[in-house]
Image (tube, helix red, strand yellow):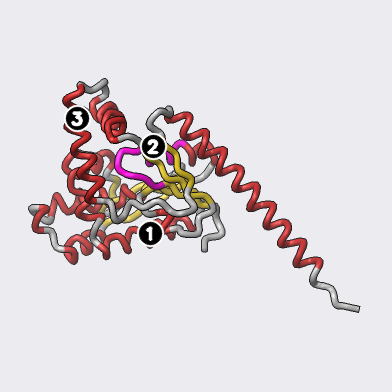
Amino acid sequence: MTSHMVVAIDGPAASGKSSTARWVAERLGFRHVDSGALYRAVTWLALSEAGDPAGWREEAVRALAERVALSPTAAGFEPLVDGAAVGEAIRGTDVTRNVSRVAQLGSVRTWVNERVRAAGGSHDVVVDGRDIGTVVFPEAPLKIFLVADPWERARRRLIQRLGRHPQEDEIAEETEHLVLRDSKDATQTVQARDAVLIDTTFLTQAEQVDRIVALARARSRVLASDAADAGEARVGGSGESA
């Protein structure tokens, strides 16, 4: 169990996990860890070097993962491929449509989880992904599960991608892609029993962030109080009986 504060944020694709987690981390003074960026970096590399995605073999993709590292930045961490930043290249359409293939590979998931845990072991972090609260940090002090209506998730993703308000037929097509992605990722996207569920369909991102920050600060106060009580108990019980 890490001695640092971990806020775990899980949820399906396009539920706003990464952007919300980044903002929450900034508000709290924590570092942001985007576990999905590691899967995307490996996917980007596989698309460049492993040929047709339908023929990807797990051992080959896992070998490519060794060329990806998670490097600390001022506000969080970023994936490097062969020591170089990949930036927005890992956010492209081809990567988005194939990242589920990589995320379903057990050995790659283990590799990603080890790197995310290492980041959380050295810093107070806000980590987003699909199984952060259930697998990666099952003892995280605060777990959040974000959900939203698929149509709204599709609309938000298109606004981010296109830089304009999308047409309804564009939203419909993107909604189909998201629903298919949800079905592929269903085994990894599971809400922890002790996670706080937040439906963001009718919330602004600022409202989402405010709620999570308030929960994190409340949880930190409880942890500090519990630690103080434990310390007093140890001091009070250290004396010998008469």
Look at discs 2 and 3 and give the one toward the viewer: 3
Q: Secondary structure at mark 3?
A: helix
Look at discs 2 and 1 and give the one toward the viewer: 2
Pinpoint residue 201: horizontal percent, then vertical percent: 38, 31
Residue named by callout 3:
172
Image point (65%, 47%), residue name: 221
Local crowd at mark 3 within 10 Å, few (<14), some, or many (≥20)?
Answer: some
Marks 2,3: beta carbons within 8 A: no
* The C terminus sits in image quarter: bottom right
50 sits left or right of 146 in the view: left
Residue named by callout 2:
19
Measure the alpha-carbon separation of dots 2 and 3.
23 Å
Local crowd at mark 1 within 10 Å, few (<14), some, or many (≥20)?
Answer: some
Image height of 175 relative to 236, above or below: above
Measure the alpha-carbon separation of dots 2 and 1.
20 Å
Image height of 92 relative to 77, above or below: above
Image height of 207 relative to 44, above or below: above
What numbered label is drawn on residue 28?
Answer: none
Residue named by callout 1:
115
